[in-house]
Amino acid sequence: MNRRALAVYSAAALAFLHLPLLVLIAFSFNSGRFTVWEGFSLHWYREAFADRQLSEGLANSLIIALVAAPLSTVIGTLAAYGMWKRQARVLSGTLYLSLVTPEIVTGVSLLALFQWTFRFLRLPLGLHTVIVAHVAFSIAYVAIVISARLRNYDRSLEEAALDLGASEWGAFLRVTLPILAPAIAAAGLLALVVSFDDYVITSLVAGVDSETLPMAIYAMARRGVSPVVNAVSALIVVAFGLLILVSQRLQDK
Amino acid sequence: MSARSWYLLPARVWMAIFFAAPLGIVCAYSFLTRGDYGGVEQPWTIENYTRLADPLYLTILWRSLWIAGLATALCALLGFPLALFIARSGRYRNLLLQLVLLPFWTSFLVRTYAWLFILRDTGLINTILLRLHLIAAPLQFLYNDGAVLLGLVYNFLPFFVLPMYATLERLDVALLEAAADLGARPFATLRRVVIPISAPGIAAGSVLVFIPCLGAYLTPDLLGGGKSVMLGNLVQNQFTNARDWPFGSAASLLLMLASALLLAALMRSRVAQELM
């Protein structure tokens, strides 16, 4: 294939990936309500911050992500380290399976679990059920990031620590963990993003009083055109973009 | 239990209770009968599975496969040249790869909403066409299979580009030169050298796109409206509005089984072993 044709084609494909988001963000700064440019304004951002549904959703989403992400980071890191020390085919297979299971299936099966346990525990749906679900689907993401880092990790470092009299746990804590620290931070940020972003599973296992930000956005998008959604979207795109960039920088370390 | 197993314990317990057990419950429900008030009751039956063969549901199954297949083909058509270009861009490789991945890391919901914003009656395209007096009334772009397809290709294109890039990156330039020296035209080189060598990447990318497309829920829900129902929407509807959990469970398991089989096929491929 001709090199220039290939370049043009690729530029078009990249434009296809980026233009929709750029246009969406551009119109969040429009002063008018309709999709006609009427002038620059931050009006829709003010309105977004004043919206009760959105701010309550944001608060819930932050609580959920700030509990679920650290929890899944700890569990996922330990699992990746354990799988690095010895094969655990069932666990790694399960983690991969959890990644490819359609979200809607994960969501309804968790709903079925919570409904079934309700008979014994009397625990209604709420923030806690969402947190539990988010940890369950984030562990695989964390484990993959940490496993990738461990693949380049020199086993002899830990062996040296053991030879010098460290206990196994001590070698992990004082030799391996510091080396893994950037990867763990990267995995944690990734877990934060996937938790904050989830709509499908969350909407199924959230209670009436635990609406998250994506659920609020979905409801608004369903209702009709509002540049407020554009403004919130723009903020999310920028926030996620920054978190992911930091996460990738950390993974490259 | 050996000391080393303790590291695995939290993940094992969590995944057993909140991933495997829920699937087990759904599996059990799929063989039960729907209760009068939406719950599940005895007797055990396979009726939920035979109902999936009902023409109404076969249509949904067929449409899901068709849309997912078409989306995969379009991702390949867009993604292969893009991956080839990136693989041959020298020092700009990483930058271009980041550009492909960046939209992927922004919220899935936001990316789908972007198309709602562009395609709806009062959306960007209709507004522009109306202003230019090219049309008198807004055109209906949304709520059909085409809109769903567009949304899926947009959302999952990076899934194809990544494994594709991973194989093409290692393509030996000497092979291309050899083909050219032997008189192959660029297109013949592409067809007879590049594509056969990168077949594992094409296969891995296709599976990685096909799995999420087959189980898509949000994209058909937002862009397809009520008209374009895929398997994911069927499952959601059975668990919410229709309150037929046993039938919804059977549909879930069908979806789960298809995803698991495709994953198993992917894990056997060479590219997967290199990427994972």
Image (cartoon, coloured by chain):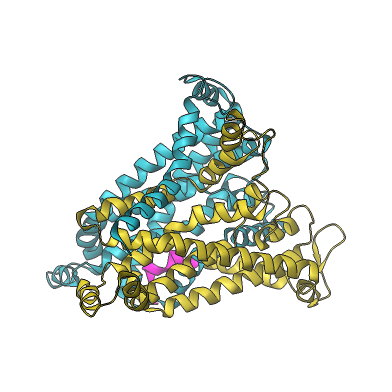
User: Which of the 4 image quarters holds residue B267?
Assistant: bottom left
Left or right: A181 as drawn, with respect to A93 = left
The residue drawn where x is 56% and y is 43% is B115
Q: Can residue B130 be seen by looking at this rendering?
A: yes
Q: Position of residue A134 (x, y in %)?
A: 51, 53
Q: How many marks?
A: 0
The residue drawn where x is 45% and y is 48% is A16
User: Which of the 4 image quarters holds residue B137?
Assistant: top right
Name the residue nearer the viewer: B271 or B4. B271
Q: Position of residue B243 (x, y in %)?
A: 79, 57
State which chain is coloured cyan: A
**Which shade of the palette goes to chain B?**
yellow
**Residue at far right of view:** B36
Specify the principal SS of the magenta part. helix
For the N terminus of chain A, which image quadrant? Answer: bottom left
Q: Position of residue B120 (x, y in %)?
A: 63, 39
Left or right: A31 as drawn, with respect to B58 = left
Name the residue nearer the viewer: B22 or B129. B129
Left or right: B274 as drawn, with respect to A55 = left
Image vertical order of residue A200 relative to residue B260, above or below: above
Q: Can residue A211 be seen by looking at this rendering?
A: no
- State which region is magenta: B1-13
For the C terminus of chain A, which image quadrant? Answer: bottom left
Name the residue nearer the viewer: A119 or A1. A1
The residue drawn where x is 51% and y is 45% is B111
Q: Position of residue B160 (x, y in %)?
A: 43, 63
Would residue A19 be counted in the magenta stretch? no
